[in-house]
Amino acid sequence: MEILKEKFVKIKVSLLFVLLVAFPLCLINSFVLVVRTYGFEELFWQNWMHVFVFNFSITYPLALIIVPFAKEIVHRIN
């Protein structure tokens, strides 16, 4: 039972870490894309949130796969 609890905590920490990295990156990336593409127009907020949701729905699952590999590579280098 203790092993399951440790694994759950480890998974929870990984999910939170990826969320804290992916969320601001997607927010900034989508902002820049909308400003470059549409500029500050009437539908700016709608366009920004639409692009953000699309961007985040791709980035978060990919980050869940890539981040553990990156951590392992950094761990092996040290």
Image: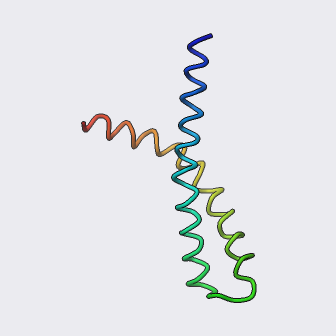
Q: Position of residue 44 (x, y in %)?
A: 70, 81
Q: Residue at x 61, y 79 (%)?
A: 34
- The location of residue 3, given as percent across then percent down, is 56, 14
Percent across and percent down for residue 72 are: 37, 36
Image: 4 above or below 15: above
Left or right of 19, for residue 51: right
> Which image quarter is the N terminus in?
top right
Location of the C terminus (image quadrant) = top left
- Number of numbered discs on residues: 0
**Residue 43's image quarter?**
bottom right
Q: Nearer the viewer, residue 24 or 74?
A: 24
Residue 66 vertical placement versus 50 (above, below): above
What residue sits 52% from the left and 49% below the top? Answer: 63
- Specify the farthest residue to the left: 78
Q: Is residue 1 left or right of residue 17?
A: right
Q: Residue 28: which quarter of the image?
A: bottom right
Q: Residue at x 32, y 35 (%)?
A: 75
Furthest-top residue in this view: 1
Q: What is the basis of the colouring in this image?
A: rainbow
Residue 65 is situated, as x and y percent measured from the top left of the image, at: 52, 43
Which is more toward the observer, 37 or 23? Answer: 23
Residue at 32% across, 40% down: 74
Query: Which of the 4 image quarters holds residue 12?
Result: top right
